[in-house]
Amino acid sequence: MSEILLDKSAFLSNLTKISQKLGGKEKIMLIAKDNSYGHGSAQIAGIAREFGIKKAVVKSEMEAEQIAEFYDEILILSHIPTGCEKPDFSYAINDMSHFSKIKNGSKVHISVDTLMHRNGILPEQLDDALRLVRENHLNLGGFYTHFRASDEIGSDFFVQRENWRNFKISAQKKCKNLGFNVVFHSCNSAAIERSEEFSDDFARVGMAQFGYFQFSEILGLKPVLSLYADRISSRLLKKGERVGYGGVFEAPCDILISTYDLGYGDGLLRYNGKGDLRLGNNEKILGKMSMDSFASKDAGERVCVFDDARVWARFFNTIEYEILVKLSANIKRTVK
Ligand SMILES: *Cc1c(COP(=O)(O)O)cnc(C)c1O
């Protein structure tokens, strides 16, 4: 049966290098959203706790519950207030309307829109936000922002970072006067790579933990996930015969081909049989991918589909995030 192998030593080495860059592992808020970018949140959380990570960030309450036992604090990013929030979690405030809808007493981190214009309050709404925190008796844990172009070369990132720094100075002063003890976080992986000095309380570490860097290999990160498919059947495809839906691949000579047990139903992007999509052994996928299988030249019982998601990301003109996050939760994950 197909399987995802998680390289524990690569993951620990990545966490060590990121900790060094940030000045301590206690600065890490580990992003675990979307099944830890497809890696498997339960498996990843187990190793992260062993390493000493105390804080995680997820998308939803459901995700938070799945890994609650592993972390001291879990921040939920995309929560829409229900009035039934739990005291165990921290909730992002993404909109001014959330203050009055979220349950009194909830622990919150306020998202600040410093340029991305996706979520959060505007810096000039700080006074109103602090008033609403008090009126609704919320437990204010901190403020954060997200960079819109930390992974793109250009001045955009620096402009936004300046906006954040200015916001931070004023929020620090106001919170001190009000007696609020708050933390600040802004950097994702690419922003960490670009920060010559790290000045927030925490960084939200996403893709870097899994071994993918955006700018340079300076940190020496290593991919954690490799994906394997197992052979279902084999046959000799004679010269001129075709394999799979629509018979898109025609054998130029007799080839022993095999069908392996992963397809687009398992979250792989669907290869339409055109162009060279290479497996981990450098062989091509032959013909259109099926929902639950693909064909290639026989490579034995097990074939590595990829051990570096960038190969598939380049082929499909997308980012490694999308390749990894789509991997079905039904694929078995094993830590090795
Ligand atoms: C996903 C996400 C991150 C992590 O981004 P990476 O580029 O994977 O490090 C950080 N902050 C927020 C708000 C996010 O949504």
Image (cartoon, rainbow, N blue to C red):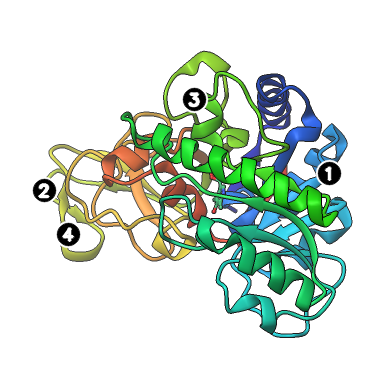
Residue displayed at 38% across by 41% down: 149
Query: Which of the marked residues, 2 or 1, is nearer the chain's N terminus?
Result: 1
Residue 160 higher or lower than 102, as above or below: above
Q: In the displayed structure, does residue 163 sit left or right of residue 248?
A: right
N-term-proximal mark, 3 vs 1: 1
Tag 2 and tag 1, C-beta contact below 8 Å: no
Evaluate whether residue 40 shows in this view: no
Mark 4 vs mark 2: in front:
4
**Is there any visible trace of residue 15 in the rendered image?**
yes
Q: How far is mark 4 from mark 2, CA to CA? A: 10 Å
Mark found first going from the N terminus, 4 or 3: 3
What amino acid is at disc 4? Gly
Instruction: Answer above or below: position of 59 versus 182.
Output: below
Find residue 102 and report its horizontal and vertical position in percent: 72, 79
Q: Quadrant of residue 290?
A: bottom left
Q: Residues within 10 Å of mark 4 (few under 14, many from 20)?
A: few
Q: Kindly check if marks 3 and 2 are in contact, taking CB atoms under 8 A apart as contact.
A: no
Q: Is mark 4 within 8 Å of ligand 1?
A: no
Between the C-alphas of marks 2 and 1, the distance is 59 Å
Q: Which residue is mark 1?
A: 54
Query: Which mark is on residue 194?
Result: 3
Q: Which residue is mark 2?
A: 240
Element at label 3: helix
* Residue type, numbered disc 2: Gly
Q: Position of residue 227 (x, y in %)?
A: 53, 42
4 or 2: tag closer to the N-terminus: 2
Q: Which-is-in-front pick, marks 3 and 1?
A: 3
Quadrant holding the C terminus: top right
Q: Using the numbered discs, state the Cα–Cα distance from disc 1 to disc 4 in whole angstroms.
A: 52 Å
User: Which of 149/248 is in front?
Assistant: 149
Q: Horizontal and vertical percent for residue 186?
A: 59, 42
Q: Which residue is mark 4?
A: 247
